[in-house]
Amino acid sequence: MKMMDCVEVTVEKEIYARDGVHRGMQGWICFEQRAENYWLVNFPQCGEKDDIATISIQEADLKEIPIMHAIVNEQIKAQFERSGLKALFSMDDEVSDYLI
């Protein structure tokens, strides 16, 4: 992989989901060097909307794709927002799992 390659996330991980990035989302590598097998990847939305995120993604969790379609990201983002899973992944790490 190299800078400007289009990529797709192949796994669902909480560390990515905290930033709004989910399996199937498409982005582009926006930094020319990888660090410890991680690439800096930008995940855009269509038009003038703010990007979803620019985060480091492990190379093993990416696959190269020929063309990126930002509409895919918006569709996946909407699915997570509708399902309520967005709130689940956005909780602070320090919140206890214990029920009282």
Image: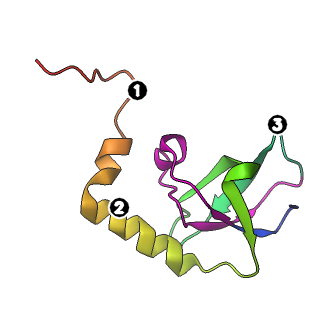
Tell me, yes or no, whether the two marked residues, 1 and 3, touch with CB atoms within 8 Å: no
**Separation (CA) of disc 2 from disc 1:** 20 Å
Q: Is residue 94 left or right of residue 14?
A: left
- Residue 18 % position (x, y): 46, 44
Q: Quadrant of residue 5?
A: bottom right
Instruction: Please state the extent of the stretch shown in magenta in the rendering.
Output: 8-32
Which residue was labeled with disc 1?
A: 93
Q: Nearer the viewer, residue 36 or 53?
A: 36
Give the amino acid at mark 2. Answer: Phe
Q: Is residue 21 left or right of residue 87?
A: right
Per the rendering, the mark at residue 36 is 3
Which residue was labeled with disc 2?
A: 80
- Residue 100 % position (x, y): 10, 17
**Local SS, label 1:** loop
User: N-terminal of the two: label 2 or label 1?
Assistant: 2
Residue 91 higher or lower than 2, as above or below: above
